[in-house]
Amino acid sequence: MARIPMVAGNWKMNGSVDFTREFLGQLTTTAGEENAVETLLLLPYLYLQTAQQLLNSSNVAWGAQNVSEYAEGAYTGEISGNMLRDFACSYVLVGHSERRSTYLETNSQVAAKFFQAINTGIKPILCVGETLEDRNNATTFNVIEQQLHAVFENSQFKNCMGSGFIIAYEPVWAIGTGKVATPEQVQEIHAFIRQILAKYDNNVANVTRILYGGSVKPENAMEIFKQKDIDGGLVGGASLHSDIFREVISICNRFCLQSTC
């Protein structure tokens, strides 16, 4: 079974109601052309209702950037998976590098969020990646393996391997630093992630999509998407510009159609 590529845009803490309405209107006028690629927008909580209203009849999916590890209760300021379901979210990010670094989320917290998402019918996008210090200390593989094992070694994992979860690799050292991860470096890590997953279930490893989240843009998209184990991109800053985001989607779509993925 071929893996359907995905181009996901993470707006982070950006946008407004007017911006969201204008952007979604521009995106949906051309998104139908990219039939070989799944398009996803990960929006701030406040704009999920707008996305639900404007994208409901389109082929563009929407989701959130974070979810609570708790189902409900006295957790002021948190948003549960069931709340996200009220706005028909299909996906949610868990363990994004900024959540891990700025808000000090641990591997166990990320795992709890992963399973909360699945338990509410939302597909989690599990983000993993190493810092510059990790790479300089040659601990990249150990760090990523620990991040993955927090989920894969959990007793709940065996019951949700067919849930359609996604993994996103973010080399933190190559995001907004001026440093660039080569397509070969990225492919090496993606292959490593798939190899770890194969230890639990080879079929799941073959069908699970692994996205690259390290400053994807039109200038490097084609070389990235050509790599065997890269199934699309988690796009950050470039996803705030509808023309640039559409171009990345188009590049992914063009490559996919050429390679019959």
Image: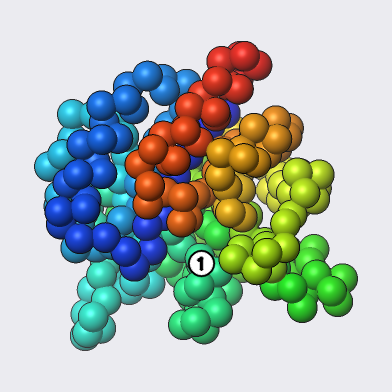
Q: Is residue 249 above or below residue 196?
A: above
- Left or right of 222 on screen, residue 102: left
Image coordinates for residue 103, horizontal then vertical, percent: 46, 82
Q: Residue at x 34, y 27 (%)?
A: 31
Is residue 118 visible in the rendered image? The answer is no
Q: Residue at x 46, y 69 (%)?
A: 112
Q: Identify the amino acid type marked 1.
A: Gly
Q: Quadrant of residue 214?
A: bottom right
Q: Which residue is mark 1?
A: 95
Image coordinates for residue 51, horizontal then vertical, percent: 20, 46
Image coordinates for residue 174, horizontal then vertical, percent: 67, 62
- Left or right of 109 on screen, residue 188: right
Image coordinates for residue 217, horizontal then vertical, percent: 56, 44
Quarter holding the C terminus? top right
Q: Quadrant of residue 209?
A: top right
Q: Is residue 121 above or below residue 80?
A: above
Q: Residue at x 42, y 49 (%)?
A: 239
Asked which colour scheme the image uses, the reply is rainbow
Quarter holding the N terminus? top right
Q: Residues within 10 Å of mark 1 (few under 14, many from 20)?
A: many
- Left or right of 155 on screen, residue 77: left
In the image, 9 versus 77, the foreground residue is 9
Q: Quadrant of residue 218?
A: top right
Q: Residue at x 54, y 28 (%)?
A: 251
Task: Please give the count of numbered marks on the rendered protein.
Answer: 1
Instruction: Name the secondary structure under disc 1.
Output: loop
Is residue 235 visible in the rendered image? The answer is yes
